[in-house]
Image (cartoon, helix red, strand yellow):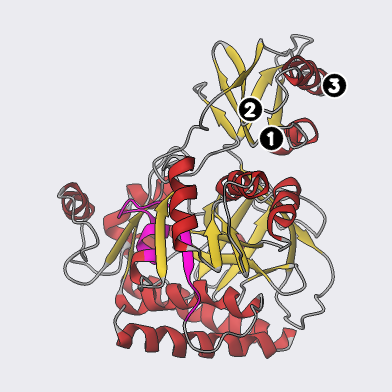
Amino acid sequence: MRLNLLLQIAWKCRHLERSCRWTPDQLQRHQTDRLSELRRFVIENSPFYRRFHRGLESRPLETLPILTKSILMENFDDLVTDREVRLADVRKFLAGDPGFALFRGRYVVVLTSGTTGVQGIFLFNPNEWVTTLANLMRPMAWAPTRQRVGKPWRTASIGSTTPWHFSSRVAASLSTRWLLRLDAAEPLNSVVKRLNQWQPQILAAYPSVLRELAEEQVAGRLHLRLERIGASAEVLTGEIRRRVHEAWSLRPYDTYAATEYAPIAAECAQGRKHLVEDGAIIEIVDEDGRAVPPGICGERVLLSVFGSRTQPLIRYEISDRVRLAAGECECGRKFRLIEAVEGRMRDILTFPHRDGNGAAVTAHAHVFYPVLENVPATAWQVIQDERGLWISLTGLRNPDAMHEIETSIRHILEQRGALAPPIHVREVAFLERGASGKAPQILSRISR
């Protein structure tokens, strides 16, 4: 990595971390001022926002319309503030397989994986990208690692290696000779072999990968002495935390992030997850876009990102179910806390009601946790299609448990009032992973 970029990121990190000492009043003033700047900027520079917010320029944030990914992509050319940027040109650029090249010699381009049904394209100018990298480095200071004099920590990052994916682009920007990048879709035995050779002190990976690696460590096939473990991009369940601790006597530090704003939240040394509120206003809202109180699970997250200037985002929807926590953290940061991230709204399975009354019964991933998190297996995945429900298990240590799993899942669904479909429990070699290497716990193949 170029020294100049390193210095920029380090300076930006230090600058950003000053906000951790702010009082609640200082944070609120900062948010108010930055939001006002952003709203003035978009009216002056984005034809789309001039239409989208017409007549609402003086109204409170919570009264503004919600920006979905579909709306963003449909109005891409008018939304971006560089009037020479056109979506057709960006698509043509990506179709040419540019690797890690910059669009128009200036913009980092990343794509979302399209798990919500629409693939998003996002551009970052040089300053926006440095800020993004600095924000992603901030949690390193929040969750302390033992001091090390001399050589940097040897690090392994396991995620996507596709150039257009956000995590891959970040890893490429931060790449040094002390970082080993591995593809989450690579066969497990190959990942284990390469990690044993590399011997990292810091490991960052999707939770589904961490769960498999913890099993390998306990089984004696993986031999790592780790100082720190980071997780992101998937839901980090309590069972995965337990297995990681069993393998390395360490607590994994979780980061909740999105391509559009990263990180949204990160864990501090107390193990509590703080919303990163100095760079955005983060609204946890219900189906109608109204704020929900602590303890109530919101149906989506709305982001108004202060630093987004190339592709401004105001009340931009992330379809995640997030629950706020009450109170303040002992670490002293005044950012709000969240109790849980339950995953995407699209990660919900729908079943007919057993009474045949036309009402649908929904089941999110957490519905299956009481059964599947305690199965003697390495990992699990629930897939719904027209033939029924498929419970996929890797590393199953007790095949006799398959019938009990089928019975328990059926009982859970019936308790919720669902007409349970045929349930098939099967052992597989690998979980199904998307283009970004993520392995969703819940996957529906039924058109909606």
Residues rendered magenta in the picture: 152-171
Q: Residue at x 66, y 10 (%)?
A: 422
Q: Decide if residue 55 is in sight here.
A: no
- How packed mark 2 is, by other alpha carbons closer than 10 Å (few <14, some 14-19, many 20 or more), is many
The residue that label 3 is drawn on is 415
The residue that label 1 is drawn on is 364
Q: Is residue 379 above or below residue 317?
A: above
Q: CA distance from mark 1 to mark 2?
A: 6 Å
x, y (%) of residue 73?
Answer: 35, 49
The part of the image, by quadrant, that contains residue 401 is: top right
The residue that label 2 is drawn on is 349
x, y (%) of residue 412?
Answer: 81, 23
Q: Amino acid at mark 1?
A: His
Name the foreground residue: 50 vs 357. Answer: 357
The part of the image, by quadrant, that contains residue 127 is: bottom left
- How packed mark 1 is, by other alpha carbons closer than 10 Å (few <14, some 14-19, many 20 or more), is some
**Element class at badge 1:** strand
Specify whether 132 is left or right of 407.
left
Q: Residue at x 73, y 80 (%)?
A: 334
Q: Amino acid at mark 2?
A: Leu
Q: Is residue 201 above or below residue 385?
A: below
Q: CA distance from mark 2 to mark 3?
A: 15 Å
